[in-house]
Amino acid sequence: MYSLLLAIIYVAFISLGLPDSLVGAGWPAMHEDLGVPVAFAGFITMIIASGTIVSSLASERVTRRFGAGTVTAVSVGITATALLGFSVSDSFWMLCLWAVPYGLGAGAVDAALNNYVALHYAARHMNWLHSFWGVGASISPFIMSYALTSGLEWTGAYRIVGLVQVVLTAALLFSIPLWGKVDRVGARRSVPGASTEQETGAGATGEETGHVPLGKVLRLPGVVLILAAFCAYCALESTAILWSATYLVTDRGVAAGTAAAFASLFLLGITAGRFLAGFVADRFGDRHLIRGGFAAVGLGAVLMALPLETTTLALAGLVIAGLGSAPIYPAIIHSTPGNFGARNSQAIIGIQMAAAYTGSTLAPPLFGALSAAVGMWILPVFLLALVALGLVSSERLNRLIPHPGAQAS
């Protein structure tokens, strides 16, 4: 039962990643067909991010009322509808219209799935699941490439991914009874194979009753700290993904092709790093993974900044930063029930998702404005500042809550 549902959730995480790279991969063709400037891609992503933030904040109330399985199935169905809407859009305003349900569906399913896995499964699965998200995000550019080169046009790529989501929606609808069975088993015993941190905080799923108001959640000791750490991580990840290739070319003299390849290695490093972290996650625990991850990203940023004629260390630093980034996101999510209790975890993870999308949406344009004023050389310094914010916030939380599970009641 645990294994069957887990397999479905793994497929769901791949499907979650599939749409995330479609806009970026297809926009060179999309903006020409739609007759809009290149910069208009930002409007699409901002609308999606805004919807995601709204649904993430509402996820706690919705999930408590309808259950994680139903919310996941319906949210994936909404996302599928939006993607199919993209596939029949012939104007920019239609894309903006369909971006609204796309964002709303993505935020709800992200928060519901992450909390469910944090409550019911061991830390290794959280890392592997997010690695599978990276697989989906890596596949979608190839789907877009296939559609563009085979005559299906960019709309065909959205149709393909939308139909995949429709199939997943059907599978999730049939799986809804399994979610309730896992909940009932989890209420009677600890999660098999879970880490000590999870057992103390997440085992008592029977506590998950009653809406937890947003104001009350924000007043819980340490919540603001974990939000700051999560926002900082997502900000540095999105900034590095968008600007690292430009930094390597303009400031370090790397050839454009080489810079593009190593920029892709940053994302691939996150995917591979999460897969590898899954093998050690239960042994080391979430807190050590978060600490070590931020430290590795900091080391990578330092190597990128070293004023040496050779570019080898700068390129190596970017790869190290990608590998270091890998365990931070899954470990922060997985540690939430242990730090704040199962009863509060859905509400807190919903706010964490909102903080994540806020950081990833605002940081890249903020860095763009900063680099225009002082120069692209500031990228490693910008990343180090975000590392410092994330590391200090997470370490302060560790001192505030020395024993995970202390706030489980």
Image (cartoon, rainbow, N blue to C red):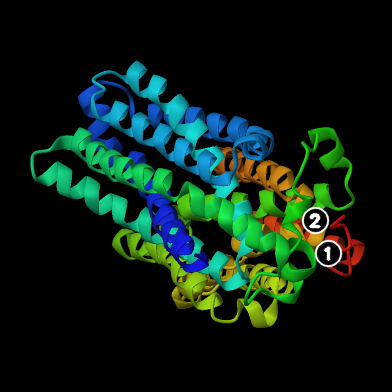
Q: Which mark is residue 138?
A: none
Place residue 44 in its image quadrant.
top left
Q: Are marks 2 and 1 in contact (CB under 8 Å)?
A: yes
Amino acid under label 2? Gly
Q: Judge whether 91 appears above or below 361 on screen.
A: above
For image coordinates 49% across by 39% down, the residue present is 106
Residue sitting at x 35%, y 30%: 81
Image height of 32 relative to 6, above or below = above
Q: Residue 221: where, in percent of width, then height?
A: 90, 51
Q: Secondary structure at mark 2?
A: loop
* Residue 143: % across, % down: 23, 49
CA distance for labels 2 and 1: 6 Å
Q: Residue at x 62, y 70 (%)?
A: 123
Instruction: Identify the mark nearer the N-term, 2 or 1.
Output: 2
Camera-side residue of 290 and 366: 290
Instruction: Give the residue pinned by disc 2.
Output: 341
| Residue corresponding to mark 1 | 405
Residue at horizontal 46%, vertical 36%?
74
Mark yes or no: residue 327 visible: yes
